[in-house]
Image: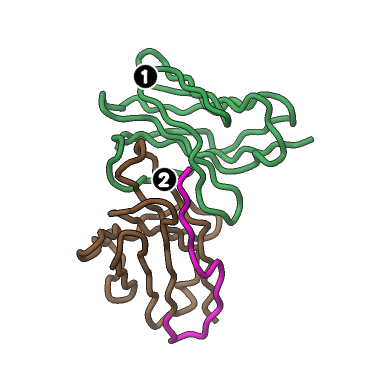
Chain colours: A green, B brown
Amino acid sequence: DAKTTQPPSMDCAEGRAANLPCNHSTISGNEYVYWYRQIHSQGPQYIIHGLKNNETNEMASLIITEDRKSSTLILPHATLRDTAVYYCIATTRGGTALIFGKGTTLSVSS
Amino acid sequence: GAVVSQHPSWVICKSGTSVKIECRSLDFQATTMFWYRQFPKQSLMLMATSNEGSKATYEQGVEKDKFLINHASLTLSTLTVTSAHPEDSSFYICSAKSESNTGELFFGEGSRLTVL
């Protein structure tokens, strides 16, 4: 799996968009970018994944740069319940276990 | 999305006893399940890969005789912490990969083990 780099922490005001960056400069052509989040004392929750096109679902949007060396997860209207650790993982689709880095701790405040 | 359930969600045991944690895929068949361990304020650490009908593959540094993994059916994997000690106290999380999904893994709610 390609190494990913994320800021250790970010703050966001409730109702505003949260933009979480991830660098994956060594990503290979067959590796997808996956995003998961972990709310305190729960198992990780799948958010979204993509290969090279931007993706959107009911939870978030994923913007991948054209060179695929970085991506941004966007939570369009953050709520207090979005406070969690967000993990960006680059891996082959349907491959082996996910290897988690330290992620970004997002704190949403009112 | 697919559902993975763990039981128990929390357990307290005495040092020297064994504890079994179950991981079930509720609405899909999982040929492969993964077990993770997470200490406070740390990230998830992969312990082992559990394949239905075969022996588990353990990550370096994880004692296979201490953490017994059984994956006897396509919907159930169990992790048994044998002769538990206080340093085994942790949050144990399983995940499952469905052959029919789009590649994402689904995680259980986690099981918090406290060894006294």
The residue located at (42%, 16%) in the rendering is: A65
Looking at the rendered structure, the number of numbered marks drawn on it comes to: 2
To which chain does the residue with label 2 belong?
A
* Rendered position, B44 above or below A19: below
Region rendered in magenta: B1-18
The answer to whether A18 appears left or right of B30 in the picture is right
For the residues marked 1 and 2, what is the alpha-carbon distance in whole angstroms? 21 Å
The one nearer the camera, B28 or B81, is: B28
Which residue of the protein is positioned furthest toward the top in this rendering? Answer: A66
Residue bearing the label numbered 2: A100
The residue located at (28%, 76%) in the rendering is: B65
Judged by depth in the image, the label closer to the viewer, 1 or 2, is 1
To which chain does the residue with label 1 belong?
A
Residue bearing the label numbered 1: A52
* Rendered position, A12 above or below B6: above
The one nearer the camera, A84 or B50, is: B50
Which residue of the protein is positioned furthest toward the front in this rendering? Answer: B27
